[in-house]
Amino acid sequence: MNMMQIYDAIVYEPLYNSIVFFADLFPGANFGLAIIATTILIKFLFLSLSKKQIETQKKMQEIQPKLKEIQQKYKNDKERQAKELMEFYRTNKVNPFSGCLPLLVQIFFLITIYQIIMKISATGFSIDSSLLYPFVSNPGTLSHTFFGIADLAVPSALFAILAAVGQYFQMKMLIKMQPEKPKDAKKDTDEPDFATIMNKQMLYIGPALTLWIGFTFPAGLSLYWLVSTIFAIIQQQFILKKKEVNP
């Protein structure tokens, strides 16, 4: 079995069947509602991974002052600085790269959802019964008009803008997680604050990329991204409030 067959068996076909399964449950075999239900299912399956990402981001922001101290102390010895930083991460049980995994997973599923949308669109929104599991009923032809708001088979400016706005507010929440500096605080290091720089860049780059995707690809993709972002915002809010109550 090659990699493509493995991908089809463990990712593509399960997602395809999930969309068809949910579409069969909704009146008119609504493709949009099936995408929403599948998106929520994906988010629940990776709930613990997303939770870990949020907690890591919060922890990284809390330890920024100490990281800057290390950068300043060993600013003339980059090799020693790197070793001290890695040791500090290890001691505090923080993996600075763990936050990338959930994003990669989300992009991976975004690509798969896109492939499914394009396949179903190419067949006139008829279902390929050869891909269905025995327990999944074939609803026939899916309705690709989302309550008269948008045709999920073509780009939608409305969904693109909504998804971009959602992405902006999600990034805004992450930036607000950073501890505030006193107004009279002096800069204690001449090392660049990469976390702050990256956050400020992503505050605009993320929404801009989402907007471009929304104006370029079928609206079904923007719908998936919008629902995924809303779920992430709710999850972030819940986790952060819970930590405030039980620090």
Image: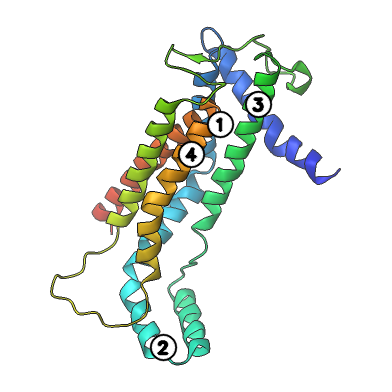
* Quadrant for the C terminus in the image: bottom left
Question: Amino acid under label 2?
Answer: Lys
**What separation in Å lies between label 1 and label 3 (alpha carbons)?**
10 Å
Question: Amino acid under label 4?
Answer: Trp
- Crowding at dot 3, Cα within 10 Å, few <14 / some 14-19 / many 20+, comes out as some
Of residues 219 and 143, which is closer to you in this image? Answer: 219
Asked whether the residues under the numbered discs 2 and 3 touch, taking CB atoms below 8 Å apart as contact, a structural biologist would say no
The numbered mark, 4 or 2, whose residue comes first in the sequence reads: 2
The image shows residue 40 at horizontal and vertical percentages of 49, 32
Residue annotated with mark 1: 217
Mark nearer the viewer, 1 or 3: 1
**What separation in Å lies between label 4 and label 2 (alpha carbons)?**
40 Å
**What separation in Å lies between label 4 and label 3 (alpha carbons)?**
18 Å
Q: Is residue 13 above or below residue 178?
A: above
Residue annotated with mark 2: 75
Mark nearer the viewer, 4 or 3: 4
Residue at left 31%, top 45%? 237
Callout 2: SS: loop
Specify whether residue 219 is in view. Answer: yes
The numbered mark, 2 or 3, whose residue comes first in the sequence reads: 2
Question: Amino acid under label 3?
Answer: Met
Residue annotated with mark 4: 212
Residue annotated with mark 3: 118
- Crowding at dot 2, Cα within 10 Å, few <14 / some 14-19 / many 20+, comes out as some
Specify whether residue 238 is in view. Answer: no
Mark nearer the viewer, 4 or 2: 4
Question: Amino acid under label 1?
Answer: Phe
